[in-house]
Image: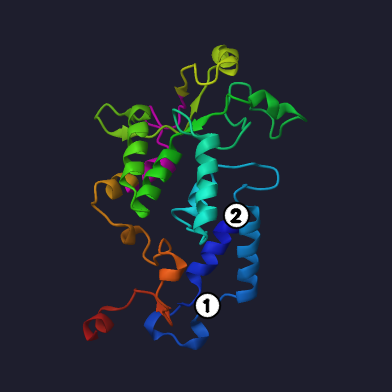
Amino acid sequence: SVGLAKAALEAINGFNLFGNQGCSWSVIFVDLDAHNRNRQTLCSLLPRESRSHNTDAALLPCISYPAFALDDEVLFSQTLDKVVRKLKGKYGFKRFLRDGYRTSLEDPNRCYYKPAEIKLFDGIECEFPIFFLYMMIDGVFRGNPKQVQEYQDLLTPVLHHTTEGYPVVPKYYYVPADFVEYEKNNPGSQKRFPSNCGRDGKLFLWGQALYIIAKLLADELISPKDIDPVQRYVPLKDQRNVSMRFSNQVDSVSLREV
């Protein structure tokens, strides 16, 4: 959340709420000192997700698309490498280690875990294909076709298809209760099954939207600039110093005058 807040403040800094009809008082400026504190807080946490979590797949959309909250290339590589090394699986990425969400051992009637209960979920965490899509998109933005192809190949076998032949992204894959002990004794040995959300007409819209974006980028039907118009993906040192930004929503008369 710190990283996304930092990215949002950077993106809105200098934005004129009234477009080319505005003036100095309608421009949003971000407090520089507060922004620097956010940056220092984020950099002090990474490559960990937080004090309690060693890493988390949620860091992918924070340090890469869509937030691009990190300017330090070394810290970016360390954070990304840790996420991939700790959480990557055959069917997707785990959200974080010992994550009990939607596992066979989770009690769906409770909103919290008992003390030390998370140890039960060690090695049987659900895997989420959506993070393969984030890695595909990251590969496009960083000009790494090998990474794009790698995660496209991993994604293909975990997709479902409708009766019309359209690809559908399952929300997650889980280990059935009967296979939990086998999976714990021999990690990666058991087949995982897809969630109901993401098949049988129940679309996981977040994953489906990212799939469309990733495919359009991979097939070069759109460019990174099309989905990142403020060019958050451009390194800070390479960004041009723009004195004022304004909304592109102008009336037809103004447009014709231009």
Task: Choose top left, top right, bottom left or bottom right for residue 141.
Answer: bottom left
What amino acid type is highlighted by mark number 1? Ile
Query: Would you name the residue on which mark 2 appears?
Result: 1
Examine the rendering and report whether any part of residue 126 can be seen: yes
Side of 175 where 133 appears, left or right? left
Query: Would you name the residue on which mark 1 appears?
Result: 28
Side of 75 where 237 appears, left or right? left
- Residue at left offset 45%, top offset 31%: 197
Query: In front of the other: label 1 or label 2?
Result: 2
- Residue at left offset 69%, top offset 29%: 118
Determine the CA span between mark 1 and mark 2: 21 Å
What amino acid type is highlighted by mark number 2? Ser
**Residue 234 at x, y percent in the picture:** 40, 64
- Residue at left offset 52%, top offset 36%: 85
User: Can you name the residue that lies furthest to the right here?
Assistant: 115
State the residue in front, 142 or 29. 142
State the residue in front, 250 or 217. 217
- Label 2 sits on a secondary structure element that is loop
Query: Considering only vertical position in the picture, is 78 above or below 87?
Result: below
State the residue in front, 62 or 82. 82
